[in-house]
Amino acid sequence: MNKELMEALDILEKEKEISKETLFDAIENSLITACKNHFGKSDNIKVEIDKETCDFLCYAEKEVVEEVEDECTQIDLEDALKISKRAQLGDIVHVEIKSKEFGRIATQNAKNVILQKIREEERSVIYNQYFEKEKDVVTGIVQRYVGRNISINLGKADGILNESEQVKGEMFKPTERIKVYILEVKNTPKGPRILVSRTHPELVKRLFESEVTEIKDGTVEIKSIAREAGSRTKMAVWSNNPNVDAVGACVGINGSRVNTIVEELRGEKIDIINWDENPGNMIQNALSPAKIVAVFADPDEKTAKVVVPDYQLSLAIGKEGQNARLAARLTGYKIDIKNETQAKDAPGFRYEDYIDDYEEYDEDEYEGEYEEESADSLVEDENWEEGESWEEAPEEEFDGEDSSWEEAADEEDGWKEKAEEDWTEE
């Protein structure tokens, strides 16, 4: 048993996570390469390795002939009988090759073949390991600044945090531990190239998934997220269980869960709102903490017009338009915000702009509200006589609440004049 080789293979398999099968293939190829360098050809060279004991045998297949013309592929009968007593002309015999007979150059080449195979497998293992973690969050250690980029040690490989993926104002010290989002893993001749980010919205989503149990098990879903890195994040959540409050689960007791994520993001503010299928309700939630008077949403055009109280306009828009901008990203709607004063005369911001035949709608509304005072009901009244004008109707008919009938009639577009003309014609 070759104990030294077995121990070396065990160590490589444990530390580098390279399978023994791959290592055995590398040893076999290295011995064949060494034979080629030693003899000039390797077409008839065979290598057998016992994977249990790590013993290996290297031999050349040679044809038995009377006169040897090529020593690499042929052997005379006399020498063949020394190897096998049954050897005859035309037979193939296995001539053992001692690896100790290889020259220095052949040995060095064999070593390089094994090392190259180990490096390739190590890179492949690391690439596959981090490729599985693509679009996920990992913890890394800050190593050094490379120009404006930062090198992050992710364990078995280094990640690159480009300047464009850094949050403005964030400064890191060497050996500091931070969480990063793996954007992309590329396989290059020099090993895997891992690009990481601190600004991606998915970073916040993954942090909530790791911190909030309800999100991890699927009870609470993160429907949408919008982020301006380093400043503010808006996130819409939905609960599949009516007994579970989606926002409360994400916030935690006394804000314990969300505060952990805020600390990791260096104080970035996080707004958590309830997701709603109704676009109007969703936009209203997205613009929180501002109060909304009315929302007119167009699902086809993906636009919305929002009316807010005069004193809430600046709050709804936010600093440098941030609140409105994040709400637009979160909902996918183009949002136009005006206060009540501006909305009075602005087209598209009034209720009548969204109601067909607005005047007919008003007449129906008044008829429903003042049904007892309508003209038809007065005609049917037993105290009403044909030909009598409405001005001569008994006063008791307009006592109490009915006394406002004349004012209500005046407010309608010429209703009073129309009634007088009708009765005069009669």
Image (cartoon, grey):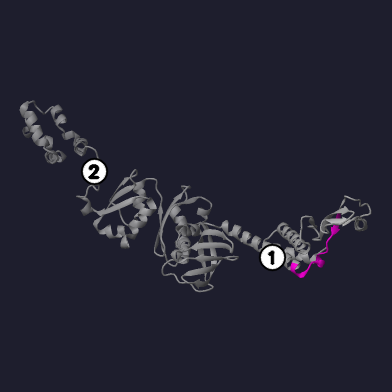
Q: Is residue 100 magenta?
A: yes
For residue 115, the mark is: 1
Along the horizontal axis of the image, is 52 left or right of 135?
right
Assign a secondary structure to mark 2. helix
Mark 2 highlights which residue?
A: 353
Quadrant location of residue 370?
A: top left
Which comes before the other along the chain, label 1 or label 2? 1
- Whether residue 393 is visible here, answered yes or no, is no
Going by the image, does 188 lie left or right of 59? left
Q: Nearer the viewer, residue 415 or 215?
A: 215
Q: Identify which residue is drawn at 49% across, 58% down.
A: 208
Q: Quadrant of the N terminus?
A: bottom right
The image quarter in which residue 171 lies: bottom left
Nearest the viewer among 91 and 211 is 91
Q: How many marks?
A: 2
Question: Which three-letter amino acid code belongs to the residue tagged 2?
Answer: Asp
Look at 55% across and 62% down and name the residue there: 193
The relative height of residue 90 versus residue 414 in the rendered view (above or below) is below
Mark 1 crowdedness (10 Å alpha carbons): few <14, some 14-19, many ≥20 = some
Asked if the residues shown at circle 1 and circle 2 are in contact, with their CB atoms under 8 angstroms apart, the answer is no
Q: Which circle, 1 or 2, is nearer the viewer?
A: 1
Q: Residue at x 70, y 63 (%)?
A: 113
Q: Does the magenta run of residues contain 341?
A: no
For residue 118, say whether it is visible: yes
Q: Which residues are magenta?
A: 93-105
Crowding at dot 2, Cα within 10 Å, few <14 / some 14-19 / many 20+, comes out as few
- Residue 124 % position (x, y): 62, 59
Q: Quadrant of the C terminus?
A: top left
Q: Amino acid at mark 1?
A: Leu
Q: Residue at coordinates 5% horizontally, 29% vertically from top-left?
A: 424
